[in-house]
Image (cartoon, rainbow, N blue to C red):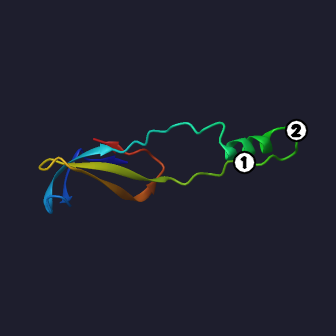
Amino acid sequence: MKFPKEINTYCPFCKTHTVHKVKLYSKKGGTGRSMAKGTRKHDRKLKGYGGKRKGMKTPKKQGKRQKVILTCTVCKKKHERVLGTRTKKKLEVQ
């Protein structure tokens, strides 16, 4: 999905429509704690030679709603916008 680098949209801080720079929102993915109680419990369920083990089947994922960070060129404040449709493809700022 393609999205422009700059858009003219409402700034809640300036309370007017101004030009905004568009940047892709990227969540920094950290790893979970391996010694957390839930993780240990889950690992115990997966352990062993049992038949159908819990938590192994992965469902087909639904596309996420893409999020962009808008930076106002006048006041330099940032706010985010979630785009309406769920997309399978990554957002591409051009």
Q: Is residue 16 above or below residue 27?
A: below
Number of residues whose C-alpha sits closer than 10 Å to that of mark 1, classed few (under 14), some (14–19) or many (20 or more): few
Q: Which mark is residue 91?
A: none
Residue shown at 45%/46% (left/top)?
Answer: 89
Is residue 6 shown above or below 18? Answer: above
The picture places residue 51, in percent across and down from the top left corner, at 87, 45
Q: Nearer the viewer, residue 63 or 29?
A: 29
Residue drawn at point x = 40 percent, y = 42 percent: 26
> Which residue position holds label 2?
49
Which structural element holds mark 1? loop
Q: Check the image and report above or below for 9 versus 77.
A: below
Give the left or right position of residue 87, taking residue 6 as reference: right
Residue 14: percent from left, percent from top: 14, 59
Q: Nearer the viewer, residue 66 or 29?
A: 29
Count every numbered label the image shows and give the total.
2
Could you tell me the amino acid type at mark 2? Tyr
Query: Is tag 2's residue or tag 1's residue first in the polypeptide sequence?
Result: 2
**Which residue ends up furthest to the bottom in the rendered image?**
15
Coordinates of residue 7 in the picture (x, y in percent): 20, 52
Amino acid of disc 1: Lys
Q: Nearer the viewer, residue 88 or 70?
A: 70
Cα distance between the residues tagged 2 and 1? 16 Å
Q: Is residue 88 left or right of residue 2?
A: right
Looking at the image, residue 31 sits to the left or right of residue 21; the answer is right
Q: Residue at x 50, y 53 (%)?
A: 63
Give the residue number, with chain letter if any, for mark 1: 57
Residue name at image x 20 percent, y 61 percent? 12
Secondary structure under badge 2? loop
Viewer-closest of 5 and 73? 73
